[in-house]
Amino acid sequence: MQQIKTYLDQIATISKEDWGVFISKLKPQVIPKKSIFLKLNDIENTISFIEYGVVRLFIPKENQDKEITFGFSFKNQFISAYDSFLTQTPSAYQLQALTETSVLSITYSDLQDVYKTTQIGNLIGRLTAERLFLLKSKREQNLLNLTAEQRYVKLFKERPELLQVIPLKYISSYIGVTAQALSRIRKRVILIS
């Protein structure tokens, strides 16, 4: 619980009363490696804070090689199929723990209660919405403005740990290329380095 408090304290001052209400609603959970914890067409009922681990956001396909990975979330970030959470409608994508992942989750109904009784709920909702918007916007801009090789190099420079914990097939999908194209890009990047 200290990790989420430290994270939120960097953003806003939270009263003891609000903090007490908020943490009383949080449920800890450890999600095993490779587990899908929100399936396609399920309604997202939680927002979660990642204490440790890596989560992948993806659109499943019958052929797993054709899945579309469009996001990753890491330690000290909030994760949710936020559009499904907000509208309480079925999700168009899935969430998968790529590593063992520990989260603190709050349900939709509990968050609505926190909204009504505290200031912190609105903060969490806004932070989650802003983060997800920025991830989406950044990815769209990268896909439109950068070559596949530039996207790979940028990802490698910004998050070198990704390459250690995320399978290359998910990275290739994330940057919008086939696994074979990523292999060629990686060879060129190694030769240049």
Image: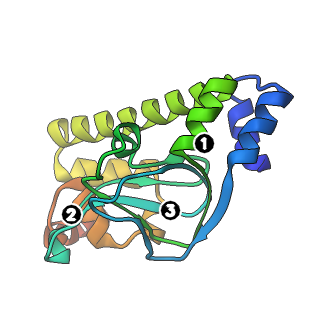
Do tag 2 and tag 1 residues touch (Cβ < 8 Å)? Answer: no
Which residue corresponds to the image point at 19% horizontal and 71% vertical from the top-left?
179
Q: Spatial distance from mark 2 to mark 1, Cα to Cα? A: 46 Å
State the image coordinates of residue 68 (x, y, percent, origin top left): 21, 60
Q: Spatial distance from mark 3 to mark 2, Cα to Cα? A: 24 Å
**Local SS, label 3:** loop
What color scheme is it? rainbow
Q: Earlier in the sequence, mark 1 or mark 3?
A: 3
> Mark 2 sits on what residue?
185
Vertical relation: 57 (above or below) 63: above
Q: Is residue 21 left or right of residue 49?
A: right
The answer to which of 34 and 144 lies nearer the viewer is 34
Vertical relation: 80 (above or below) 29: above
Q: Earlier in the sequence, mark 3 or mark 2?
A: 3
Q: Residues within 10 Å of mark 3 (few under 14, many from 20)?
A: many
Which residue corresponds to the image point at 68% horizontal and 50% vertical from the top-left?
26
Q: Residues within 10 Å of mark 1 (few under 14, many from 20)?
A: some
The answer to whether residue 192 is seen in the rendering is: no
Q: Earlier in the sequence, mark 2 or mark 1?
A: 1
> Mark 1 sits on what residue?
110
What is the three-letter code of the residue carrying label 1? Asp
State the image coordinates of residue 56 (x, y, percent, origin top left): 39, 61
> Mark 3 sits on what residue?
54
Of labels 3 and 2, the one closer to you: 3
What is the three-letter code of the residue carrying label 2? Ile
